[in-house]
Image (spheres, rainbow, N blue to C red):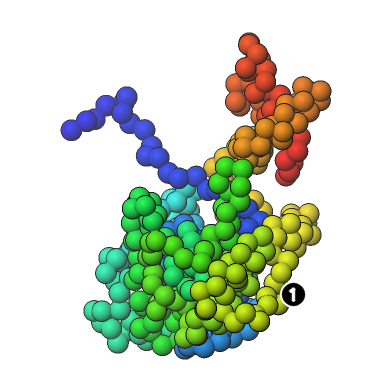
């Protein structure tokens, strides 16, 4: 047994990450799918009507009955829902069943400090309970009404398959985890839906790439289990629809930089009529549109970069967007050169000097450190202050 003061340190806990405009837009769309009086299960990495066919209009009313939570993973978002009075529909005196708990130090601190009577309403159960309806199936069906099973996908195809655990070259990115179980429950329970969220694009070097493809050589969730996809540009309800209707719906939530090529591929394959056109309302799916839509809320202090608080210091929170900007700029030499020139011409202010000190760049000793200092200074000047 290893037991000594030298090895007595707190275990690592994953810090809360800042939430981008893209992720907020996805969350807002997904939140409109959650029904009052329903059930919520959220998968690892995620931030919600009945039967087949069209989803009801976005839910915008207050949560009077509240939600019941049954989730493979319990993390800080669920505590936020409890604090907001949303997670309150109890099943046998319990408002939340979770298989395992994971979050930043503040998450565990909140659980430790929770009143005993409130903590008793949160119960830990095996994965076989949260991810399956077998074993007391009648009781689970009564409890999991209007369930929304929300999970992340890396990519999706126009035909409604989801790619979440690996690449077409055989590289494994993660385990499938409970994603298939989520989808299976969504099809087994009356009124339930599977919601797979994904960002419409990702950055690969200098180029943006679409996360919605015509086809892909690996799949996690097959097309016959397609249900609801959410991107920052909207919701695609594809359960029970024809291939042509599924393709049309997926095109509407794709990034407009890739829509024409995706549509051409579908038409060339004979899966979409040659006369099909993407509606005008969905041909402006650009990142700038998302930023513009959320800017008034951002300017008003909502939504915050860290929805449930952060273990990062104020200085570290200030550095995060600047370092992200530098990460993007390293693929564009001209942008990097512009940052270097700006940082050399405009000295840092007092707040920026604190950030430079956190990186050990407050007193550069050689040319490389002076260059790094100039780059970080410019990135700080270009990134949001709050």
* Image-based side of 116 in relation to 6, left or right: right
183 over 210 or under it: above or below: below
At which x and y percent is residue 71?
A: 39, 67
Count of all numbered marks drawn on residues in the image: 1
Secondary structure of the residue carrying tag 1 is helix
Residue, x 44% and y 67% (percent of image)?
162
Of residue 194 and residue 257, the one placed in the foreground of this image is 257
At which x and y percent is residue 44?
A: 42, 59
241 over 328 or under it: above or below: below
Q: Residue furthest top?
A: 365
339 over 70 or under it: above or below: above
Residue 377 visible from this viewpoint: no
Residue, x 37% and y 52% (percent of image)?
169
Residue, x 38% and y 37% (percent of image)?
10
Of residue 247 and residue 87, the one placed in the foreground of this image is 247
Badge 1: residue crowd in 10 Å (few <14, some 14–19, many ≥20): few
Residue, x 48% and y 61% (percent of image)?
155
Query: Which residue bears the numbered disc 1?
Result: 280
């Amino acid at each position: 047994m290893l037991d000594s003061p030298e090895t007595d340190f707190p275990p690592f806990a994953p810090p809360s990450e800042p939430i981008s405009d893209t992720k907020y837009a996805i969350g807002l769309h997904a939140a409109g799918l959650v029904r009052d009086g329903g059930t919520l299960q959220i998968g690892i990495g995620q931030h919600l009507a009945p039967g087949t066919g069209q989803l009801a209009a976005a839910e915008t009313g207050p949560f009077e009955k509240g939600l019941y939570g049954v989730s493979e993973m319990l993390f800080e978002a669920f505590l936020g829902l409890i604090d907001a009075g949303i997670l309150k529909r109890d099943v046998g005196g319990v408002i939340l069943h979770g298989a395992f708990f994971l979050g930043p130090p503040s998450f565990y601190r909140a659980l430790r400090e929770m009143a005993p009577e409130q903590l008793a309403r949160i119960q830990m159960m095996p994965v076989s309970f949260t991810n399956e309806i077998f074993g007391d199936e009648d009781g689970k069906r009564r409890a999991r009404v209007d369930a929304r099973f929300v999970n992340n996908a890396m990519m999706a195809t126009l035909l409604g398959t989801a790619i979440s655990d690996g690449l077409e070259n055989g590289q494994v990115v993660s385990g499938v985890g409970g994603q298939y179980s989520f989808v299976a429950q969504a099809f087994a329970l009356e009124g339930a839906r599977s919601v797979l969220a994904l960002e419409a694009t990702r950055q690969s070097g200098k180029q943006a790439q679409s996360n919605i493809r015509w086809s892909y050589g690996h799949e996690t969730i097959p097309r016959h289990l397609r249900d609801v996809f959410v991107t920052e540009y909207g919701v695609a309800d594809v359960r029970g629809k024809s291939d042509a209707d599924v393709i049309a719906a997926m095109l509407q939530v794709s990034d407009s930089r890739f829509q024409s090529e995706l549509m051409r591929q579908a038409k060339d394959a004979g899966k979409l009529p040659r006369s099909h056109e993407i509606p005008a309302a969905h041909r402006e799916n650009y990142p700038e549109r998302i930023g513009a839509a959320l800017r008034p809320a951002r300017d008003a202090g909502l939504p915050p970069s860290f929805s449930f608080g952060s273990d990062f210091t104020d200085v570290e929170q200030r550095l995060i967007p600047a370092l992200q900007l530098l990460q993007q700029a390293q693929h564009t030499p001209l942008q990097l050169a512009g940052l270097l020139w700006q940082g050399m011409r405009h000295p840092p202010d007092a707040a920026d000097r604190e950030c430079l000190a956190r990186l050990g760049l407050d007193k550069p000793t050689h040319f490389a450190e002076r260059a790094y200092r100039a780059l970080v200074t410019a990135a700080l000047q270009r990134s949001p202050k709050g």
